Amino acid sequence: MMGTAFGQEQDADYVSMVEAQGDAAYAFDFFTTSMLWTCIAAAMVFIMHLGFATLEAGLTQRKNTVNILFKNVWIISIGLLTYALMGFNTHYPVDSWQIPGILGINGPISGALGGGENDTFAYGGTALAMTAYGDFIFQAMFAATAATIVSGAVAERVKLTSFMIYSTILVAVGYTVAGSWHWGGGWLSSLSTPFKDFAGSTVVHGFGGAAALAAVLILGPRRGKFTAAGVKPILPHNLPLAAIGVFLLFFGWFGFNGGSVLSAAPGPLGLVFVTTALAAAAGALTSIFTAMIVLKKPDLSMALNGILAGLVSITAGADVVGPWQAVIMGAVGGILVVFSIIFFDKIKIDDPVGAISVHGVCGIWGTISLAFFNTEFSIVSQLIGVVGVYAFAFVFSFALFFIIKLIMGVRVDEEEEVAGLDVAEHGAPAYTE
Amino acid sequence: MMGTAFGQEQDADYVSMVEAQGDAAYAFDFFTTSMLWTCIAAAMVFIMHLGFATLEAGLTQRKNTVNILFKNVWIISIGLLTYALMGFNTHYPVDSWQIPGILGINGPISGALGGGENDTFAYGGTALAMTAYGDFIFQAMFAATAATIVSGAVAERVKLTSFMIYSTILVAVGYTVAGSWHWGGGWLSSLSTPFKDFAGSTVVHGFGGAAALAAVLILGPRRGKFTAAGVKPILPHNLPLAAIGVFLLFFGWFGFNGGSVLSAAPGPLGLVFVTTALAAAAGALTSIFTAMIVLKKPDLSMALNGILAGLVSITAGADVVGPWQAVIMGAVGGILVVFSIIFFDKIKIDDPVGAISVHGVCGIWGTISLAFFNTEFSIVSQLIGVVGVYAFAFVFSFALFFIIKLIMGVRVDEEEEVAGLDVAEHGAPAYTE
Amino acid sequence: MMGTAFGQEQDADYVSMVEAQGDAAYAFDFFTTSMLWTCIAAAMVFIMHLGFATLEAGLTQRKNTVNILFKNVWIISIGLLTYALMGFNTHYPVDSWQIPGILGINGPISGALGGGENDTFAYGGTALAMTAYGDFIFQAMFAATAATIVSGAVAERVKLTSFMIYSTILVAVGYTVAGSWHWGGGWLSSLSTPFKDFAGSTVVHGFGGAAALAAVLILGPRRGKFTAAGVKPILPHNLPLAAIGVFLLFFGWFGFNGGSVLSAAPGPLGLVFVTTALAAAAGALTSIFTAMIVLKKPDLSMALNGILAGLVSITAGADVVGPWQAVIMGAVGGILVVFSIIFFDKIKIDDPVGAISVHGVCGIWGTISLAFFNTEFSIVSQLIGVVGVYAFAFVFSFALFFIIKLIMGVRVDEEEEVAGLDVAEHGAPAYTE
């Protein structure tokens, strides 16, 4: 592909290209590696959306599979677009707050978000080793997650168009406003000891879990779940699909947490990979044993939810606790999730995939417990953050879903629910046999 | 694992290793990061083959699933091997053209493709920041794609051995010759304003789509699809499988487009990730709404094809348009694909997975439209490229498939088609129940 | 997100951060890239566990699917945790051997494994360009693989709790002790010509294959497989699931082999990606043709196992052979695997997924054949390594499984086997219809 002369000429070009960075040549290289990691991490977070889609589809009934997949295609797509249209600048209002530290609704990203300094380490400095486009795409992939969490909880009975409108507003406005309080420099980052939530146990998962609870309260349980004769389990239709989902979520979480290092700095990156993996493993094991004791059987769904419980539990503190602390945080999450799922069933709140327990309950645990293990953080600040974000998510979601209910309804009618949403809403079954 | 003394000794070794690069040490680091990205991107493009396999299997009938999976195992394997045997050196003939700029059929890669300068930035200079092996593996992963596109279009009725021969020659000769015109320094790169096709809307996807059209014309529709009573839809047998396929393709496309930056340069890399993601999202949304209007239902298959339509539409220009232009390009792609699929059904061209529409039609749109948005490029050159590559792909595929038809037939007999290829050709069903 | 002034200030911070590395700034950048690769490779090896889970589930019967998925969730979780509890320090005893070069059982990783020099290139020097946490997480992902291999071979009849205990001890003690002989500086690395096993054809795959053989001998075949009337094939219940598994394993293998370069050095990395891919492709093709000749049909399961055979065959020598040698090594592996699977069926050793053939038999071939192609290595040393590791794995596994059999039994009773383990052991089917 090249002769020696050609090669040598190219060498010179190469060196000049990097040397054009002057004294900053080393920094340019570090920045290049970090920005590459941001992009790869964004792709890994993207694949979590396939994880959610298959997990939710697998844990629900066969007749509602197309509907769930469709909602997940919708959410990632509308999530990315609204993040460009208003989410990014609302998440990070910089100087454009309408109510300082609390509300900064802003407009679309600029077509010239890239180019010039925004493509260099001038953009974010050492704290954010990525270009503006890198920052955008990584955060955009996060944004859709909140709505996806709700998708699982309202599955099998929500009206499609209502959910499409709800999820659009939730991801565009609700998530980004709550996120701005912490990541956008808002009031949670101005507490005397700032609220700490590394990759979003509260501002992503907790937000989604609390929003899901509100939506489920309005929506009511699936028909036939809570009968006079007691709770009737509705069996998951495809557990391999659910297992694919959880393994992909685990995989993607390395990008979710690892990318939140916001650079490729070797020390923090290694720590975050280890705490993430060990918390997930611990969550799986404790949920397995808890289910063996409580449910008297080795329950695959619980084991899968245990992995996710461990992951949510470590997400707030993955960079500030050690490996054994991560094991404890994940292990407690794995126990909590089993009891929480049983509890919500008992109080007749029907969450087909356990999303409120996994994301909502473990999000609280993860956010608060990091202050037990790392005394640089304040339990009070952590509590304030949890209460603030969960309350906002709950109220925002409740109000939004309630208004949609008034205007157009949020639930399919009985006939459609019994027939299944696939044929009723989409005119096609997921499987031919 | 090390004491302090050992550590210090190692430090010295480390620094000397990199310092051995002399003035080029910074450049060496940039090159290392870029080559790493090339390798990871190659792996991501590889996973697109699983995406194609599951998408095609999911969108077709249960009784032909083994056959489709088998063809996809075949294509990636033969694609990699023929690329080593002749593809790479035919794709990039350097000085070994038989007909300059048009045809340069060449032999196997050298067993010493690596080593010496080929393992350094002397290999490709600043424009191609990878070693020779990196260049090979990334391009080899692309090569098999063209044949995979055809695989979907001819599904459920093509004779296995005929397809094995056809796909081998298509990927080894057809794809690489067409590719040499653009990426190998051939005539398309010598137009007064050179033809622009960043990652292959035309030279990969368009090639595959045009080849598929030719093959389908020879092959004819599946029995029972176009009856006297009208078009009879043949339902996809497993939509979760199809959804897995599309999400994996979306994921892999970050490697496909992102790797085509040919380095880890932060500016272009971030831009390409953003344009790719936004075009896909826009394609999904417009195909959803178009299908709602035209087909009167929220159609999952169309939504999935809309994502792919957006991706194909941005592939030619992902590095030269801005985010909002990417949204427009993807959005138009998402509309086009719905009408195109309906159109091909209407003219009785049976493409079970919509491959001709997704790759062929959107490939044209993506390649030409980039010149609307970025005036550095010439619409005339873009048209010339599209016509040249599509015409060649169509004629090559038609001639090849026709010759195979004459020699050994290309279609299974009626009994096999009705029974399904899995049992008829492979002696085994895909599922036991 | 920043004004110019802010940007400039950040520039200065940035440069100082990297310049703080002094003369080692170039080396710091190389180390950063290498450590990033280690982390990404670890995530790719993680996804192999999803590959194993889906492959094993797909190749077995519908009624045992939950059981197989559960075992795979168990293995990755217990594998990660025991690697932290004792595996890592037993795998790499450094100065803490009880029997020098042979046995060094050690305790948990330190909570302070990160921080200080362990987060810098002082940790592993040029030979191991990662932090201590990077080293841990990459190796931890490997560890669980051995037990996963056994999981497939004992599928559909093993008692769950017995397997949970067996796999825990196998991965915590057996694998790490055998691994210490080669990677931990033990006796295999002290042979006059040291034993060469790049990424573990023998010490991972061979270990797992030999352990599986021992377990299967104790366990016996599935009921109804070997009848008076001859061998009765038990059909795989879901071949798309199996195909997903193999493609994910292929994808993950780029991390398995590529990460074993232990840095991002561009030369070796490119070579390893190419030899890995070509060996897999060659294995697929030869297994396809071998099956066509021997079994008289294009067999998808064999093609899939051929890919894995090629991958196992190149794993020992991926960094020391050229591309065409890789093709030969993979091609022979693809032939071997077909005959080996037939052979084990003939001698009535029932291995539902072909794990003993894929990992055990091809592991031998790959480990020994590299010495044919690269004369720096000694066939005698390779043989010693194979015999040593396989014998140990077989005896360890046999003894362990036998003791468990005496204490609590290892096989489900006939009624459970007929009913399927999903309902019998887990109280839930994998699919509702």
Image (cartoon, coloured by chain):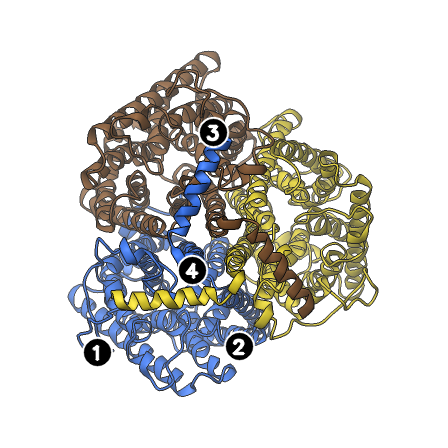
Chain colours: A blue, B brown, C yellow
What is the C-alpha distance between the residues marked 2 and 3? 54 Å
Name the residue located 41 percent from the left edge and 31 percent from the top edge: B146
Front residue of this view, candidates A292 and C117: C117
The kind of secondary structure element at disc 2 is helix
Disc 4: host chain:
A
Q: Position of residue A371 (x, y in %)?
A: 47, 83
Q: Nearer the viewer, mark 3 or mark 1?
A: 1
Amino acid at circle 3: Ala
Is C126 left, or right, of B127 in this rendering?
Answer: right
Mark 2 burial class by Cα count in 10 Å: few <14, some 14-19, many 20+: many
Q: Position of residue C234 (x, y in %)?
A: 63, 42
Image marks 3 and 4: residues in contact by CB distance under 8 Å: no
The kind of secondary structure element at disc 1 is loop
Q: Position of residue A415 (x, y in %)?
A: 28, 57
What is the C-alpha distance between the residues marked 3 and 1? 68 Å
Res A151 quadrant in image: bottom left
From what the image shows, is residue A345 above or below residue C11? below
Task: Indicate which disc, 4 or 2, sits on the residue closer to the N terminus.
Answer: 4
Residue C352 visible from this viewpoint = yes
Disc 2: host chain:
A
| Residue linked to disc 1 | A100
Return the mark for residue B419. Answer: 3
